[in-house]
Image (cartoon, grey):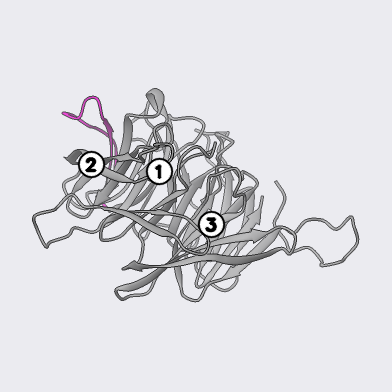
Amino acid sequence: MSMPHSSSSTTSSNTKRKEIYKYQAPWPLYSMNWSVRPDKRFRLALGSFVEEYNNKVQIISLDEDTSEFSAKSTFDHPYPTTKIMWIPDSKGVYPDLLATSGDYLRIWRAGEPYTLFECVLNNNKNSDFCAPLTSFDWNEVDPNLIGTSSIDTTCTIWGLETGQVLGRVNEVSGHVKTQLIAHDKEVYDIAFSRAGGGRDMFASVGADGSVRMFDLRHLEHSTIIYEDPQHTPLLRLAWNKQDPNYLATVAMDACEVIILDVRVPCTPVARLNNHRACVNGIAWAPHSSCHICTAGDDHQALIWDIQQMPRAIEDPILAYTAAEGEVNQIQWGATQPDWIAICYNRHTEILRV
């Protein structure tokens, strides 16, 4: 792994490819994610963070000849998106869909210049009340499954139908497969595990300070993997992409990331605590079981090698500082393992690692 830096812009044929590409959006950014399709290499979706009803989602793409990002599609979104994900379709066999969470879960079909709204998934049909969604996850093994987490203490597993009938437009719809009370308080994040086939296991974190694991085949009970000693709310969780025994979580206003091993519940196997302000994002490497990236309000994105666990992990192996702002989002591209994307203020940057 090399330290990201901007290359000189010479015109000689042996110019090293740039290490950083930057895009400035028209508004502050919060949510962001990489496209997964192999034919759309450097494509990302960005969600605005404007504290009013009218927000935007923008799809941007890097032109590798000009080394510039450009907006391919921009569309309206009610309220800021709490998360954006593209369908985990690494072979390009499904419709080109992305999902957003906010007041509800919405499915969109990407296009240039127009992205089409496909459907809204609302589990509360007979009420004007809506419990906002804090996060969601799209199942990689079965892209017809999406799990959402909500401030109403529940997680909902949705089944998607993408109606792949030849000769007609794909209609996307969804139905509730199951809804469960997952925590005693608000649920802040949900993530499917790759364990046991990768379809049925998921975990959630919430305001009660616990990490809980569920199995869609046995929803009558859950397993508490970890509880914060002070019952501080846990805001994020992320499963290791290569070794399903490990997951990472971060508590509210915490400067450290906790690594857990599901085989040793309730005892962190590592604490990554080089950040000098609260951590906002965690992303495991898509291609390596021992690398994880963390980002926070100290303007830093740090990459860690956790191979020596359970010995203490003292320092990251790579540090990048976003001079102008607090890093509020980080994503490590599943089909682009050499690139990490971060958001701060109105900017998205992709960094070669």
Q: Where are the magenta residues, as a range?
A: 211-232
Q: Earlier in the sequence, mark 3 or mark 2?
A: 3
What amino acid is at disc 2?
His
The residue that mark 1 highlights is: 168
Residue 165 position within the rendered picture, expressed as x and y whole percent measured from the top left: 39, 36
Q: Amino acid at mark 3?
A: Leu
* In the depicted structure, whether residue 230 falls above or below residue 289: below
Q: Report the residue at 35% width, 59% height from top.
A: 82
On the picture, is 258 further left or further right than 286? Answer: left
The alpha-carbon separation of the residues under discs 3 and 2 comes to 27 Å
Residue 215 is a magenta residue: yes
- In the rendered view, would you say 96 is above or below 325? above
Q: Is residue 59 magenta?
A: no
* Viewer-proximal residue among 212 and 22: 22
Residue at x-position 37% and y-position 74%: 50
Relative image position of residue 241 (x, y in whole percent): 49, 36
Alpha-carbon span between mark 1 and mark 3: 28 Å
Of badges 1 and 3, the one in the foreground is: 1
Depicted 219 relative to depicted 232: above or below: above
Check disc 1 and report its element: helix, strand or loop. Answer: loop
- The residue that mark 2 highlights is 175
Q: Element at badge 2?
A: strand
Residue 44 has which mark?
3
